[in-house]
Image (spheres, rainbow, N blue to C red):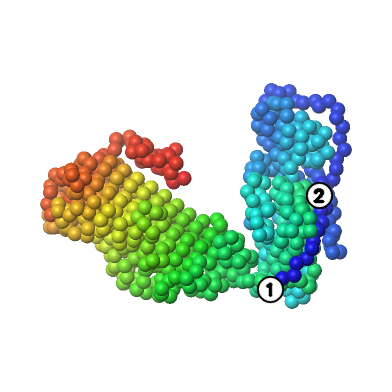
Amino acid sequence: MNKSIYIIALSLLATVFSCNKAEVVRPEETGDLVTISAILPEDIDVKGAGIKSTLSWTWSDYDEIVVIGETTEVFKIKDGFTPKKAEFVGKAVTGKTFTILYPGESAKTTDWTGQVQKGNDNLDHLRYEAALEGVDDYTTFSFSNDWAEAHGGNIKQTGVLKLVLSLPAEVTSAIAASVSAEEPVFFSGNGEELTDQITLQMQDLTLDGDQLIAWATTSWNEAAIPAGTILTISVNTGAKVLSQEIVFAKETVLKSGMVNSITLGAKDWEEGSHYASGKGTAEKPWVIETVEQLLFVREDLLAGATRYFKLGADIDMKDVEWVPLNLDSPYDKGIDFDGNGHTISNFSNKAEKYPSFFGVLYGYVHDLYFADANIETSGKTAAGVVAGYCGTGDYTGKIKNVHVTGSVTSNGAYAGTGGLAGKGKGVSATEPAIEGCSFEGTITHNGGKNGVGGLIGIPDNMKISRSYFSGTITTNGNYVGGIAGYDASQIEISDCWVDGELSDRQRIGGIIGGIIKNGTAVRNCFCKASVSSTIALGGIVGHASLDKWSADTSEPENVIEGCIAWNKFIKTTLEISDEYKENGSSGVIVGYTSVKNYLKDCYRKADIDFQEVWTGNVPYDQENASPEAPLTETKPQKYNFPYHGKAAAAEATISSVAQSLGWSSEIWDFSTETPKLK
């Protein structure tokens, strides 16, 4: 690619204001309402390649100014303002020096990513923000360097980046433009965080032979670009990405309070990759900003390697016929997919094999939102919105900070259906494979098979932590749980919660339906959901005895510790009578458990609504249990081994019980009656 030696052109944004140093007359420092006067920078004409555009910052209704001294007050704009001059009213501020913030205190942390320009050479999206710091007056002031210096302080004000780009004649539209560097040199907002890219999304933009004129607000912190830095200017036309590289001959500063202009000719554009930018590496992931770019991901995955992707914008996948990404054995196409806090909306998939976004996830997906997702299949396959399988065999998967709203419907006769993933294989039972995630919506399985979970149907060798499910699960199979259906090997579920409605044929738990493997643990979880089935119902765990009815002889060494059952109700769908005694008990914490499990410090709501087939089997307090001190039952029979934990105090809340159990305040927020994950 050709590299142009370039010196950036800077045009001053703000007009200088004259001022004098006469004695300042301040209002009485009584807290009474006072009126202050403020002046915005004057207009400045910016010329480039024969096109003239005028920047004009103006006051508007509902504007506010924050003044910080020894006290802090908000001043609201008064009626009768002009475009440049306005009066504001608020309480007097005490102090000798002041910081004046426009448009408010939030300006300190404004994030300038995600800007959208509607139309070519349009300025409507640009925003002015400023801070006068350490000044000796706040009663009458101008947002200018001269005024700030004359009053003993300094000014920070946002800048503007202007791109004047001559494109090949055949280019008639653009949907994004960006400036990127190999290292983070730009400020992403008014804070201190650096980024390697300034990106501007575009809407309703047609060119018809015109130059592309793009404008982006930049941080009030000045970005120093070292000499020799290569910048890549990219334009996404919707059909392809064009790019040019420029090299600065000397150190250049992206100035605040100024228009920083880059002008490029039409002859040096080169057609880049399918993506907005990047190289598919950990250091430079491919950036995806459109559906069209997203559709290239599948073909760019590579067997035996990991490719890196990052969303650069929200994406609407309505009416997109999606093929899950990794479908073919041995499922060794690795991926690192960084959602970057963006949302994929209206995603749907009806594939017969691994219906989901990733298919078989070998790798890592994080910081991603799915809104209004829908999975529907009749295939004999594991199913979930994120992945059919979150890892399989030696190819493990991890999902972190991924949040989904929507529905999953599986009509196929296959075990493993979940909100995020149908099945999954992690690295170990102590390393999170699903962390900080959620699913809100409905899950339905009509295939008569087992293992349906709010997050994952059948987890294998993994930890699930800091996550939740809220919604409805309905199935005609067994082993249903608000977090997981059942364990395929040792797993751990910790610091999770569930709310909604859960129902199945038998063996159902608020957190996990069945613990059928040795060593699995459930710790510090609570459930508020209603639970209904025929037998083996538990507010936390349904069945915990190695998938056998041998509670008094099995030794699975499972752990159910520090959990809280606050279920709306736990009810069997069979008639309560002696006829069904030989079917397996239900319990407020665990429906049917080995007496040699580790059952420790679990609590139930004092007046919980509990009904089950064992006539007269009402909840009662039980002491902690272990292999050395087995659980004591009041009616020990082959099918009657429930664990009810202990009743909380009548006035207790979930938060108060959780705090008494020592749940971590670094993980949970206990400020309301129901804890919230931080």
Instruction: Decide: is 349 above or below 118.
Output: below
In-front residue for pair 588/433: 433
* Residue 403, percent from left and from top: 47, 56
Give the farthest residue toward the bottom: 170
- Give left or right: position of 46 versus 271: right
Amino acid type at image mark 2 = Leu
| Nearer to me, 149 or 451 | 149
For image coordinates 68% across by 59% down, the residue present is 181
- Res 373 seen here: yes
Tag 2 secondary structure: loop
Residue at 30% over, 60% down: 489
**Residue at 82 percent of width and 46 percent of height:** 14
State which quarter of the image contains the N terminus. bottom right
- Disc 1: CA contacts within 10 A as few (<14), some (14-19) or many (>=20): some
Q: Which residue is mark 2?
A: 13
Position of 25 with respect to 572 (left or right) is right
